[in-house]
Amino acid sequence: MAYKPHKGMTTDTIMIAGHNGEQISAYVARPAGNGPFPGVVLLHHIPGWDEFYFETTRRFAHHGYAAICPNLFHRAGEGMSDDIAAKVRAEGGIADAQAMGDAAGAVKWIRAQSHVNGKVAMFGSCSAGRQTFMYACQHKDIDCAVELWGGRVVMAKEEINPKMPVAPIDMTAGLSCPLLGLFGNDDKAPTPEQVNQHEAELKKHGKNYEFHRYDGAGHGFFYYDRPMYRTEQAIDGWKKVWAFLEKHIG
């Protein structure tokens, strides 16, 4: 299907019910018109609920998707995204259970919108790549998942803690939908060896997945506002994302 940009869109910051019904903020963007449009839930990375993720949410709307990006760091308070993210990191990150509850709230919200066609994907990078994979293993209410360089899918014993009590790789048998993974071969988290382990487990359980690995790219090679950005690899990676979503949610 040929790409048709949606030049008109609406955006807003709203409140949704997250983990345990707690109210959290979320950024939403949708194409102009009644749709129906496929839905996408974006989980933001450890640098925070930031400009990159706001712009990426709008990018999905430009490509014809109704998108929502919940603020997983809402409970850490108001302020600049860098400051809030630093506070969250200092506290050891957020609990997996809380992230899953917030993600579930975003999925529920987008599925309830009359302009959504009933198909929903989840997209996340860095820590959120991990959370996206974990969500797809624990829930059955998304139709496909996009994991970008998810760190700590494979975890050493010393990395297990009360906030992250189970390594996501150990949840692989529960993966309920097709998975796209994009990775840089120069990354240290995950390393190529960890990506190999991740893929081997997916193969072992007969899961529907596709992994693409890029030479000359490390962690965060989509981040055009950071030194790790890699133009050619990012362009190709986005082509892989759009083709995957078109195939699975239309």
Image (cartoon, rainbow, N blue to C red):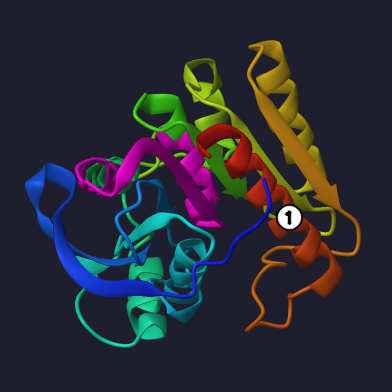
- Viewer-proximal residue, 193 or 33? 33
Residue 99's place in the image compared with 119, above or below, is below
Which residue is rendered at x = 29% and y = 64% of the image?
A: 71
Instruction: Give the quadrant of residue 1.
Output: top right
The answer to which quarter of the image holds residue 217 is bottom right
Q: Position of residue 94 (x, y in %)?
A: 33, 55
| Most distant residue in the bottom direction | 80
Residue 78 position within the rendered picture, expressed as x and y whole percent measured from the top left = 21, 82
Task: Looking at this view, name the residue that lies furthest to the right.
Answer: 215
Q: Write the start and end of the magenta stretch as one range.
A: 106-135
Q: Is residue 188 visible?
A: no
User: Helix, strand, or loop for circle 1?
Assistant: helix
Magenta stretch encompasses residue 131: yes
Question: In the image, what residue occupies the spot 66% across and 82% down?
Answer: 226
Q: Is residue 188 above or below residue 21?
A: below
- Determine crowd level at label 1: few under 14, some 14-19, many 20+ residues with C-alpha closer than 10 A: few
User: Of the residues shown, which amino acid type is indicated by label 1?
Assistant: Lys
Residue 114 percent across, percent down from the top left: 21, 46
Q: Which residue lies under the disc numbered 1?
A: 239
Q: Is residue 178 above or below residue 50?
A: above
Residue 46 visible within the image:
yes
- Please indicate whether residue 123 sits to the left or right of residue 235 in the image: left
